[in-house]
Amino acid sequence: MADDPLSTTFAALADPTRRAILARLTEGPATVKELSAPLPMSGPAVSKHLKVLERAGLITRGRDAQWRPCELSAEPLREVAEWAEGFRGFWDASYRKLDAYLVGLAGEAPPEQKGQLRAQ
């Protein structure tokens, strides 16, 4: 999986605890203790999740005296967003078909034709 960063990122994002950690890190850097506080698990369990996130490149861990604050590294998330963007055309077409179907059920002119009818 190391040769496929996108798969590594998706694997890291597959766990809700890791997604919660990333959501918290959008607010700024945090220590393991701060990240553990709202979670129903021990500090060592959170540390295991942090290692997965770090291997995926989603977080970085610094040094501040005895603390090792974690910080969000969003570049892999940009790559996920770019990958998902490839499906936009599919969803847009699906919504247009749904709109046309619903308009047909209601017996109305499609939205794009309503504007044309008013202009005439």
Image: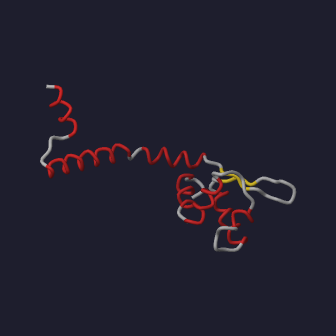
Location of residue 45 with respect to 3 vertically, above or below: below
Could you say which is closer to the camera, residue 27 or residue 95? 27
x, y percentage for residue 67?
82, 59
Question: Residue drawn 68% across and 62% down?
Answer: 50
- Return the x and y of residue 88 as percentages of the image width and height: 38, 44
> Residue at the location (70% across, 68% down)?
37
Residue that lies at the very extreme toward the front in this rendered image: 118
Q: Residue furthest top?
A: 120
Image side of residue 32 versus residue 49, left or right: right
Q: Quadrant of residue 89?
A: top left
On the image, the x and y values in percent for residue 86 come to 41, 44
Q: Locate the C terminus by quadrant.
A: top left
- Tell me which residue sits at (57%, 52%) in the image: 5
> Residue at coordinates 55% horizontally, 53% vertically from top-left?
4
Between 106 and 101, which is closer to the camera in this rendering? Answer: 106
**1 relative to 46, above or below:** above
Residue 109 drawn above or below residue 120: below
The quadrant in which the N terminus is found is: bottom right
Q: Position of residue 6 (x, y in %)?
A: 53, 52
Q: Is residue 110 left or right of residue 46?
A: left
